[in-house]
Image (cartoon, grey):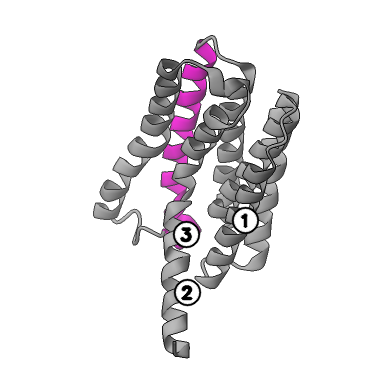
Amino acid sequence: MTKSNKIKFADKAAKIISILFHPLFIPLYGMIIILSAPTLFGYLPASVKRILLTIVGINNLIIPMLFLPYFKYRGIIKSWQMESKEERVLPLVITNLFYLVSLYIFWKFHLPFFIKSFVLAAAVVSTLVTIINFWWKISVHSVGAGSMVALVIILSLSMHSPLILLLLGTILIAGLVLSARLWLNSHNQYEIWAGFFLGLFFTGMTLLFY
C-alpha cells in the first residue's frame, strides 16, 4: 500500500468513526449500555426497555437529525460537519432543548434513579457545551467519548459489577474518536482534550451525586 493509499484509508476510517460515534448517537448508546450491561438494569422488562430506547431515539437522535436538512437548505449550516462554531449554535440549541424534553419525560416515570441521572447528565453536559460553543469550538465528539467512559465507570461502581471488558471497549472507542477528530483537523488538541475531560467529569459527577 502506497503512502497516498494509506492516507486515503486513514481519512475514510476517521470519517467512519466520526459518523458512527457522532454526538447525536451518544445518548442512545449510553441507554443501550445501561439496559444491556450485566447489572440489575438488564433485568428490566423488555417492554420498558423498548419505551426508554424509543424516547431517547426519537427525542435525541431522530428529531435533531430531521432539522439538519432544513438548516442546510436555509444556509444556517454550510456542511453536515458544521466546521465553524457559528454553524453549530442553532443545532446545539435545538438538540439541547430536546435533551430537556427527554429529561422531563424520564422524570415523570417511575424508573431507577440511575437511569434518570444519566438523562440529567446528558442534559447538563449538553447545556455546558451549548454555552461554551458561543466562545470556543470545543469538540462535541470528544465530550461524548468522555461521557461514555464516565458512564461505564460509575455504572460499575454503583452496581458493584466489574464491567472490565465494557470499560476497555469504551476507552478504546474514545481513543479512536479523539484520534479521528485530530486526524481530520476538525479540532486542535486543546479542544479535543477539553471536550473529553468535560464529558468525563460532569457526566461522572452527575451520575455519582444525583
Q: Secondary structure at mark 1?
A: helix
Q: Nearer the viewer, mark 1 or mark 3?
A: 1
- Amino acid found under the numbered disc labelled 1: Leu
The residue carrying pointer 3 sits among few (fewer than 14), some (14 to 19) or many (20 or more) residues within 10 Å by Cα, namely some
The residue carrying pointer 1 sits among few (fewer than 14), some (14 to 19) or many (20 or more) residues within 10 Å by Cα, namely few
Circle 1 residue: 172
The residue carrying pointer 2 sits among few (fewer than 14), some (14 to 19) or many (20 or more) residues within 10 Å by Cα, namely some
Give whichever of 175, 164 is nearer the camera: 164
Q: Earlier in the sequence, mark 1 or mark 3?
A: 3
Circle 2 residue: 10
Specify the principal SS of the magenta part: helix
Quadrant where the N terminus sits is bottom left
Give the vertical position of 182 relative to 42 (above or below). Answer: below
Residue 85 in the image: x percent, y percent? Answer: 50, 57
Q: Is residue 142 magenta?
A: no
Numbered circle sitting on residue 17: 3
Q: Is residue 111 left or right of residue 149?
A: left
Alpha carbon of mark 1 to alpha carbon of mark 3: how far? 12 Å
Give whichever of 27, 188 is nearer the camera: 27
* Residue 78 in sight from this viewpoint: yes
Q: Earlier in the sequence, mark 2 or mark 1?
A: 2
Q: Residue at x 52, y 32 (%)?
A: 31
Q: Residue at x 47, y 66 (%)?
A: 14
Alpha carbon of mark 2 to alpha carbon of mark 1: how far? 17 Å
Q: Earlier in the sequence, mark 2 or mark 3?
A: 2
Q: Which residues are magenta?
A: 82-108
Q: Residue at x 41, y 79 (%)?
A: 8
Q: Secondary structure at mark 3?
A: helix
Q: Residue at x 59, y 49 (%)?
A: 145
Rendering quarter of residue 137: bottom right
- Amino acid found under the numbered disc labelled 2: Ala
